[in-house]
Amino acid sequence: MEPANPESPMNGIPDFMACWDYTQPAATAERFLALLPQLTESGDLQALLELKTQLARTHSLCSQFDEAHTLLDEVEQGLTDATPRARLRCLLERGRSFNSAGRRSEALPCFEKAWQLALKHHEDALAVDAAHMMAIALPSAEQIRWHQQAITLAERSKEEGAQRWLPSLWNNLSWTLFDQGRLDEAMTLQHKCLDWHEAHERVKQAFIARWSIGRILREQGKSDEAWVSQLALQEAMDEAGQAPDGYLFEELGELALLRQDPEVNSEEFFARAWFLLSQEEWLVREAPERLARLKRLAKL
């Protein structure tokens, strides 16, 4: 969701947010550290403090929560009335660190305060971020209100940064509705995601939306339609040169199991899914039973 060119200056300051790769936090941290001297010399206190909040986020994504909080403590000590955006980012990253560590009761006040402060300072993109984090941290029954607040603000905002949040927000709300059994509404939102990504030529994200549509079709009991949809997705990904995807193989395995087609071997799909997904650290840590089931169904 960030700008593509990290070298593009903003008022003479490098656009450090363009350095983000959320799937590679350690590599991102190295890029941030390389920018620290330049931002220190620039004299722009707010930009420097903002960069440090993002460096803290790289620690949080690596489950280095003590390091994240220590860095955010340092940022807090440097905040002034002239650094409102840095204060916002500090609240957001503090909340994210708490939430990722399972300390939701401490995370929620950070997100709510960030939401209120962002509205006060007309920082629409950060307000949307805060609302979307409230939705993530709250129980399922309370999520929809915050999803909808974030979407309403993003749709009305003139900030491009806020508008770029829309497909992520639609996706998040879609899965909340999915969990509540509101499958038709979830499907409508995934089609909105797909249309947005295709219009903006975001190929990988469009593939994810297509996978989500297939997953909802399976939940609706339309296994044959879902099977055709996911096979078409696999073909499109192969043609686009995309790497094999464990989640797609997992879904194909589940559909093959459901359809009981004697000409289709579900074990092969589950084996490929297990091989790829067992290399994902967060799944190994958070969902070992899911990986064990894949291995069992693959008969490995």
Image (cartoon, rainbow, N blue to C red):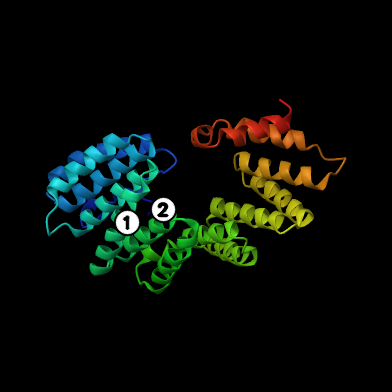
Q: Which element type, helix, strand or loop, lies under badge 2?
A: helix
The front one of 194 and 37 is 194
Residue 256 position, x and y percent, is 78, 44
State whether residue 275 is above or below residue 179: above
Relative to 54, does residue 29 appear above or below in the rendering?
above
Q: Secondary structure at mark 1?
A: helix
Task: Give the label on residue 137, or none.
Answer: 2
* In this picture, residue 143 sits left or right of residue 97: right
- What distance separates the C-alpha of mark 2 from that of mark 1? 9 Å
Q: Position of residue 176 (x, y in %)?
A: 53, 58
- The amino acid on which the numbered mark 2 sits, given as a three-letter code, is Ala
Whether residue 38 sits left or right of residue 249 in the image: it is left
| Residue 129 picture location, percent across and down | 36, 58
- Quarter of image, res 214: bottom right
Q: Is residue 252 left or right of residue 71?
A: right
Q: Is residue 247 visible?
A: yes
Looking at the rendered image, the quarter that the N terminus falls into is bottom left
First in residue order: circle 2 vs circle 1: 1
Residue type at mark 1 is: Phe
Which mark, residue 111? Answer: 1
Please tell me which residue is depicted at 42% across the width and 62% down the height of the picture: 164
Callouts 2 and 1 close, C-beta under 8 Å: yes
Label 1 CA crowd tier, 10 Å (few <14, some 14–19, many 20+): many
Q: Residue furthest right?
A: 262
Q: Residues within 10 Å of mark 2 (few under 14, many from 20)?
A: many
Image point 64% across, 63% down: which residue? 183
| Residue furthest top as drawn | 300
